[in-house]
């Protein structure tokens, strides 16, 4: 097994092991620490050969670490009593079901605000690094590290229990899956444009969530958004891995099966009349997917949906996307006007969009400067290469 294959297997098993250990011993924070140690051990010991039951191995090793910790800590008499009553067997069977979705709800605990629960869940369920999560939320790495530490501290000593009505946790669960998909679709760092393992896992979990809550419009909207967006993935990169922008993509490569599935799901959820953020985002994706070309896209409708979404969320990223759509309808000057005063914490996408609109307006100097500034602010190699090329193209004579 290659290193990449082993890392992929550990990423897949990690949330299942964590869910099993957390549910068994009741303390998420302690369970997360124990599973992380078990994963680190597995990364070394599994290089030569895999155990017969990898998931059971992780659960067993994490359980032993957890019980040993309880026994060593004299200040935790209650936990020592618990440890004394436990019987840990080397061939402990793996959980019979996939607990990944359960883990999402366990992490989105009532003791945590969404600002703390979502980053913690992204770490625990998806295995995202603190740097990747910080990039998704446009905050410094140190700030995100503090949030995750506070989340773990808030859960320490609290018994892990599912709420009587899981629907109250749907909003942060959906947010986790959306951030996970977004990070997978366009990675915040690394040599490749996308991480299919992350976007694929987000879609898998969203399917499970939709099956569990078939009457929740926003859950259906989230899954539709993922399907309609992921349908374009085959055309997003050239054979050498280079980024291909939407306007230049070969639309015959788009996965029409995913488009059809996403459209059916979206139309069904829009018919409920309970319209939310993910349904609106999915509507934008649908407008792109149904257009024969970038020029034939119904940009006026895209701009209108983004305007409604901005009024609903106040999200500055929505304003950024709306500016692009408005520029396609009213011209680049109108798009640039929408960006005046917009703050996105040194986001490379803000610089890239400004550069694109300056190029459309004929200001090649400002465009070159903007593309260069965007390239300097992204850690994704494919995005950086594309932006550097754009800067060279408009800056040339």
Image (cartoon, helix red, strand yellow):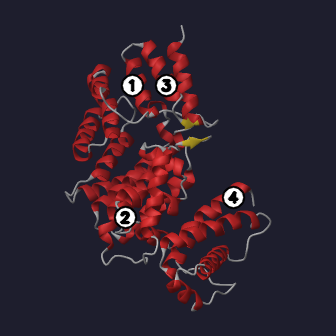
Coordinates of residue 353 in the picture (x, y in percent): 40, 28
**Residue most extreme to the left:** 273
What is the crowding at mark 2: few (fewer than 14 residues within 10 Å), some, or many (at least 20)?
A: some
> What's the CA distance linking mark 1 and mark 2?
37 Å
Coordinates of residue 300 in the picture (x, y in percent): 25, 33
**Residue most extreme to the front:** 75
> Badges 3 and 1: C-beta atoms under 8 Å apart?
no
Residue 5 numbered mark, or none: 4
Judge depth for marks 4 and 1 and give the one in front: 1
Residue 373 numbered mark, or none: 3
> What's the CA distance linking mark 4 and mark 3?
36 Å
Point out the tag, 3 or 1, that comes first from the N-terminus.
1
Residue 354 numbered mark, or none: 1
What's the residue at 28%, 59% (across, down)? 268
Point out the tag, 4 or 1, that comes first from the N-terminus.
4
What is the crowding at mark 3: few (fewer than 14 residues within 10 Å), some, or many (at least 20)?
A: many
Q: Secondary structure at mark 3?
A: helix
The residue wearing badge 2 is 112
């Amino acid at each position: 097994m290659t290193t990449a294959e082993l890392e992929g297997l550990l990423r897949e098993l990690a949330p299942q092991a964590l869910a099993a250990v957390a549910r068994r011993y009741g303390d998420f924070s302690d369970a997360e620490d124990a599973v992380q140690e078990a994963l680190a051990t597995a990364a070394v010991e599994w290089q030569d050969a895999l155990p017969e039951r990898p998931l059971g191995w992780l659960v067993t090793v994490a359980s032993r670490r957890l019980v040993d910790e309880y026994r060593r800590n004299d200040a935790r008499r209650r936990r020592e009593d618990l440890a004394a009553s436990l019987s840990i067997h080397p061939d402990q069977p793996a959980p019979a079901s996939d607990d990944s979705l359960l883990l999402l709800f366990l992490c989105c605990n009532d003791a945590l605000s969404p600002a703390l629960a979502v980053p913690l869940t992204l770490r625990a369920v998806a295995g995202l690094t603190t740097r990747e999560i910080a990039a998704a939320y446009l905050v410094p790495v140190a700030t995100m590290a503090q949030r995750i530490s506070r989340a773990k501290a808030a859960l320490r000593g609290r018994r892990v229990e599912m709420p009587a009505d899981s629907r109250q946790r749907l909003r942060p669960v959906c947010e986790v899956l959306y951030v996970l998909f977004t990070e997978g679709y366009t990675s915040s760092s690394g040599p490749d444009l996308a991480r299919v393992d992350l976007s694929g896992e987000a879609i898998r979990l969203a399917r499970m969530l939709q099956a569990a809550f078939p009457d929740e419009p926003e859950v259906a909207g989230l899954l539709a958004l993922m399907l309609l967006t992921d349908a374009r993935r085959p055309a997003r990169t050239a054979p050498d891995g280079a980024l291909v922008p939407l306007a230049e993509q070969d639309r015959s490569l788009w996965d029409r099966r995913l488009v059809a599935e996403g459209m059916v799901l979206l139309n069904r959820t829009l018919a409920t009349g309970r319209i939310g953020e993910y349904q609106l985002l999915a509507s934008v994706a649908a407008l792109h997917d149904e257009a024969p070309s970038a020029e034939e896209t119904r940009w006026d409708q895209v701009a209108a949906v983004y305007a409604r979404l901005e009024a609903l969320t106040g999200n500055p990223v929505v304003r950024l996307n709306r500016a692009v759509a408005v520029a396609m309808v009213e011209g680049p000057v109108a798009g640039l006007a929408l960006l005046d005063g917009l703050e996105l914490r040194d986001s490379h996408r803000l610089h890239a969009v400004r550069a694109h609109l300056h190029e459309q307006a004929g200001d090649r100097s400002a465009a070159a400067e903007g593309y260069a500034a965007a390239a300097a602010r992204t850690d994704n190699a494919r995005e950086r290469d594309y932006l550097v090329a754009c800067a060279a193209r408009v800056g040339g004579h």
